[in-house]
Amino acid sequence: MAIKNKYLKEVYADLEQRNKDQPEFLQAVKEVLESLEPVVKARPELQEAGIIERIVEPERIIMFRVSWVDDKGKVQVNRGYRVQFNSAIGPYKGGLRLHPSVNLSILKFLGFEQIFKNSLTTLPIGGGKGGSDFDPKGKSDAEVMRFCQSFMTELAKHIGADTDVPAGDIGVGGREIGYMFGQYKRLQNEFTGVLTGKAIPCGGSLARTEATGYGLCYFTEEMLKDHKDSFKKKTVVISGSGNVATYACQKATQLGAKVVAVSDSNGYIYDPKGIDYKIMKEIKEVKRDRIKTYVNYSKTAKYTEGCSGIWTIPCDIALPCATQNELDEKSAKILIKNGVKAVAEGANMPSTPGAVAAFQKAGVLFGPAKAANAGGVATSALEMSQNSQRLAWTFDEVDAKLHDIMVNIYKQASEAAKKYGMEGNLVAGANIAGFEKVANAMLWQGISY
């Protein structure tokens, strides 16, 4: 697809000119702007108030040096970021990513997506993202701690419970959140819900670890239900083997499906008898090992080098949960040929534009990331609520709220697509539903000079 509306074309051309070295960010913006053409046409006040120009530009970008000392006593230097994209409906909210691939383009893409994903949750949270090109893999706990403390020493100046509440992302789990939280508390001399994904004794929420994977399945189940179908007796392929993939595997299994394949960055496991999520948890959460060791637990499992081959396995439902642009048009066409009925994104923008177009053309049910994987940030916002109230909800209470949020997200996306003449197009529907709430808030608040 291409942007046809003259106003939107001009906005995108200007953005492209100023951000030539940011392909991931431009890809994310283009997809949203394509969806917004009927909205802009129906609502001229959006152009008059410059809403589009303002929403594609971050409110603030913070970039800083992170110096730390490794176990050999050598000084190491990394680059830290926080993109505070939009606070029209609440404090900035979005994860911190620690990975060598982290750069401004990726963080702006993630932060931009986060605006609309957070809006869809119906909770009062804006969009942001951050992180560093530091790689925690292969580092000792002491090295990770020293990095996190140095990182938070600068970041602490720019965040707060009512300003910006970061969470975890790739490379940032409970260990990293703990080190950052401890440093923030030490610097600010206050115990506040400034980070989510905290340990349970420190104000964390039950069900947060499971939330993105569970939420992905709740969304997918609602999408299937709307087409008189379900997970029952379906074959599922899930890319990735981190938190999202592990708990998507668990919930899909509980809903009656059989997950036959999972992967990591090195390769994938195929087990025709079904993947056991308990073994995944043992490998990844306890032993912190590679997914190929799954064959040591199952005689019927087979490991194959190269992760992209996972999409050649026939399945009814595909859940890409690894990383951006992992599922390309070629892989999408193989899935379609093999009879896939539904695809829902557990990672951020894991399907390329060509793949999405192929799925939509073939009539495959498609749940876009900003809707389907919003369960994690939704539960982070529920953690914020518990912190503000000085309360702790049970696992079942949080899980029930998460389920209701994901069902509502599907309904919002479905109804918005229908309202603007694109029934069944959940990509457009999610973009529109998320955008309109933020745009209306920006209109109400006026223009800041």
Image (cartoon, helix red, strand yellow):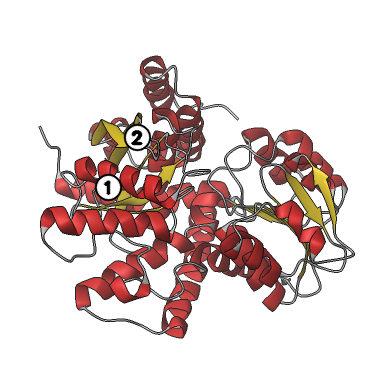
Mark 1 belongs to which amino acid? Gln
Q: Label 1: which residue?
A: 149
Residue 248 visible here: no
The front one of 74 and 2 is: 74
Residue occupying the point 87% across, 50% down: 338
Above or below for 376 versus 202: above
Q: Nearer the viewer, mark 2 or mark 1?
A: 2
Image quadrant in which the C terminus is located = top left
The front one of 281 and 332 is: 281
State the CA–CA distance, disc 2 to disc 1: 16 Å
Residue occupying the point 57% across, 59% down: 244
Residue occupying the point 55% across, 58% down: 372
Above or below for 235 versus 435: below
- Relative to 433, is 239 on the left or the right? right
- Circle 1: element type: helix
The front one of 184 and 319 is: 184
Whichever of callouts 2 and 1 sits on the residue coming sooner in the sequence is 2
- As drawn, the label of residue 73 is 2
Asked if the residue under mark 1 is in contact with the one under mark 2, i.e. CB atoms within 8 Å, the reply is no
Q: Position of residue 144 (x, y in %)?
A: 39, 47
Residue occupying the point 28% across, 42% down: 151
